Amino acid sequence: SPFSRLERALLLGGYFLAFEYSVVSRNYAIGLLLGLLHVRLIGRVPPWAHALLLGLMANSNLYAAILSGVLALDLAARTREPRAAGPTAYSN
């Protein structure tokens, strides 16, 4: 992430993540947790695990369903782009 360690700690301990999303609106916290878990595990687990996480995320609330669709499109684009063989892959 583009944030420093201090900024990440402040973000996680901030009002919206610590109180609004976890106490007032619990279903938002579940969607946020599954979305962050999906992003953290990109490239580390097989695609079926991502599909499971995004499916669970889509079932938590409407906003998470929309975000889950966007993340699924991003995952599909990542798996379909060709891998470069090295620094000379595009040179003649």
Image (tube, helix red, strand yellow):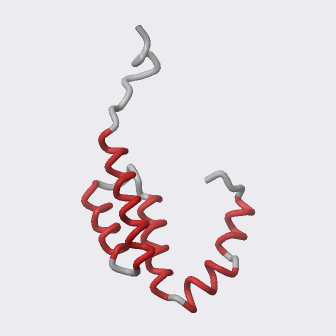
* Left or right of residue 20, residue 62 in this image: left
Between 15 and 45, the residue placed more toward the observer is 15
Residue located 35% across and 73% down the image: 58
**In the image, is residue 11 above or below residue 45?**
below
Farthest-out residue, bottom? 24
Residue 41 horizontal/vertical position (percent): 42, 58
The C terminus, quarter of image: top left
Q: In the rendered picture of this protein, how many numbered marks are placed on residues? A: 0
Between 47 and 20, the residue placed more toward the observer is 20
Residue 48, picture quadrant: bottom left
Residue 21, picture quadrant: bottom right
Residue 35, picture quadrant: bottom left
Residue 73 horizontal/vertical position (percent): 35, 54
Residue located 34% across and 37% down the image: 81
Residue 53 horizontal/vertical position (percent): 34, 68
Residue 84 horizontal/vertical position (percent): 38, 27
* Left or right of residue 52, residue 90 in this image: right
Farthest-out residue, left? 48
**In the image, is residue 56 above or below residue 86?**
below
Farthest-out residue, top? 92
Residue located 34% across and 67% down the image: 54
Residue located 61% across and 53% down the image: 1
**In the image, is residue 6 above or below residue 81?**
below
**In the image, is residue 51 above or below residue 13?**
above
